[in-house]
Image (cartoon, rainbow, N blue to C red):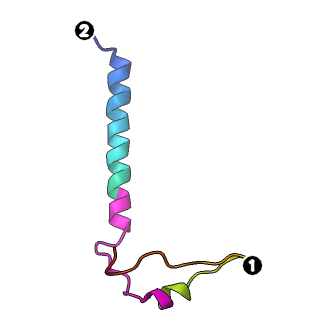
Amino acid sequence: MKIDKGVLIFLFTSMCACCLTNCKNKASSPVAYEPSPVKTPAEELSTFQLEPGLKIQLVASEPMV
């Protein structure tokens, strides 16, 4: 089986571009993420913004999940 030289160049170039892009993204993002603070269902409820006429209802919370 013979592979065209142009295809090999395209694959190699694509792999290099992906590797460079991935390295750049990792370097610009923070290394460690801090977890979000734990909130009660009532505290979480206060963070939602609903359109007029809509309502929200708690279905499950700790320790049910």
Above or below 20: residue 10:
above
Q: x and y percent of residue 62 in the render?
A: 34, 81
Counting other residues with Cα less than 10 Å from the Cα at mark 1, is it few (<14), some (14-19), or many (20 or more)? few
Name the one closer to the observer, 10 or 33.
Answer: 33
Q: Residues within 10 Å of mark 2 (few under 14, many from 20)?
A: few
Q: Residue furthest top?
A: 1
Q: Residue drawn 32% across and 76% down?
A: 33
**Amino acid beneath label 1:** Pro
Q: Amino acid at mark 2?
A: Met
Number of numbered labels in the structure image: 2
Circle 1 SS class: loop
**Outermost residue, left side:** 1
Residue 32: image tag: none
- The reply to whether the magenta stretch includes residue 3 is no
Residue pictured at 34% horizontal, 30% vertical: 11
Q: Quadrant of residue 65?
A: bottom left
Q: Indicate the quadrant containing the N terminus: top left, top right, bottom left or bottom right.
A: top left
Percent across and percent down for residue 4 are 34, 14
**For marks 2 and 1 on the same chain, the one whose residue lies earlier in the sequence:** 2
The residue that label 2 is drawn on is 1
Tell me where the magenta segment starts and ends, as one range: 24-42
**Which secondary structure is most common in the magenta stretch?**
loop
Reading the image, the residue beneath label 1 is 52
Q: Secondary structure at mark 2?
A: loop
Question: Which of the 4 image quadrants contains residue 16?
Answer: top left
- The answer to which of 57 and 32 lies nearer the viewer is 57
Picture residue at 38% right of the left edge, 82% below the top? 36
In the image, is residue 14 above or below residue 50? Answer: above
